[in-house]
Image (spheres, rainbow, N blue to C red):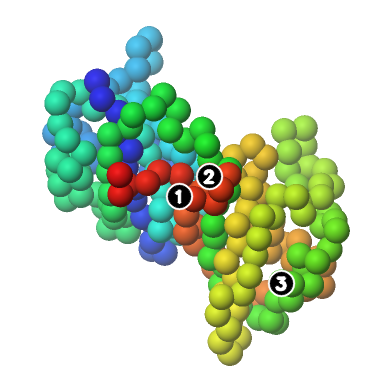
Amino acid sequence: MAKHIIEFTKDESVKYVSHLDIVRMFGRAMRRAGLGVSFSQGFNPHPIMNFAHPLGVGISSDSELIEVGIEGDISSKEILEKLSDKMPDGFKLKAAKRSETKSPFAPLAYAGYQIEFFGETPKVDKFLAKDKIVTEKKTKSGVKETDIRPLIKSARVTEEESGCTTIYAVLKCGEPNLKPELFVKALEESDCGRAEYFKIKRIALLDADEKPLIDFRE
């Protein structure tokens, strides 16, 4: 068995597809592609798949990562060619490479999000100037008031149009984790903007140095 890492996108048309459904979708697509998927051992074997960080429902993405176990001698290029035609509309494979380490997603530290904020222009600089940003956050021990300021690496306005401001935010990802929806909620609670509605896209999964978690150029 060899493990391969695949980068794929999830566009607006499928942003409400759940993580569990994506797991099932990949399993079906790989079987239709004739790939020899590796299975776990035990009474309930399942395809060996490992996602870098499950994407929340309602969020699209330009860069999702999955590690899959494949039987036989096959190159990452062949996997891309065979699997691309079997992916449903809304999902697109971008790149693939052989996984050379035991835990390739362990260095995950941040995620970069593009947030399209429709409504009152958000005051991002004022928001980040706060020493503390306290809001209710769901934790393993329940919902409690949490200072999320340490979980925001950076945020900046990248584009402004009439009625829409685009924000690029780098937020803690993994453990602990900050959901982009909570970033928007805290922004509003801090009187730094009010959204009629907003759209979120995950742009990248990053390591502690804010570099792409997986470099497919190697």
Q: Vertical placement of 13 versus 174: above or below?
A: below
Q: Please say whether residue 28 is visible from this viewpoint.
A: no
Query: Circle 3 is placed at which residue position?
Result: 124
**Percent position of residue 188, x then y:** 76, 69
Q: Residues within 10 Å of mark 1 (few under 14, many from 20)?
A: some
Residue 7 vs residue 36, the one in the foreground: 7
Task: Between label 1 and label 3, give the one nearer the viewer.
Answer: 1
Q: Which mark is residue 203?
A: none
Secondary element type, mark 2: loop
Instruction: Name the residue: 37% across, 46% down.
Output: 215
Query: Circle 1 is placed at which residue position?
Result: 212
Q: Distance between the residues labelled 2 and 1?
A: 6 Å
Q: Residue 207 carries which label?
A: 2
Q: Vertical placement of 212 versus 106: above or below?
A: below
Q: Mark 2 touching mark 1, by CB under 8 A?
A: yes
Q: Vertical placement of 4 versus 119: above or below?
A: above
Secondary element type, mark 3: helix
Question: Where does the C terminus fall, quadrant-wise?
Answer: top left
Q: How crowded is mark 3: few (under 14 residues within 10 Å), some or many (20 or more)?
A: some
Q: Please say whether residue 109 is visible from this viewpoint.
A: yes
Q: Earlier in the sequence, mark 1 or mark 3?
A: 3
**Corner quadrant of residue 26:** top left
Instruction: Name the residue: 28% across, 39% down.
Output: 97
**Percent position of residue 132, x then y:** 85, 56
Q: Earlier in the sequence, mark 2 or mark 3?
A: 3
Secondary element type, mark 1: loop
Q: Distance between the residues labelled 1 and 3?
A: 24 Å
Instruction: Name the residue: 53% across, 40% down.
Output: 108
User: Is 23 placed left or right of 107 in the picture?
Assistant: left
Residue type at mark 2 is Asp
Q: Distance between the residues labelled 2 and 3?
A: 24 Å
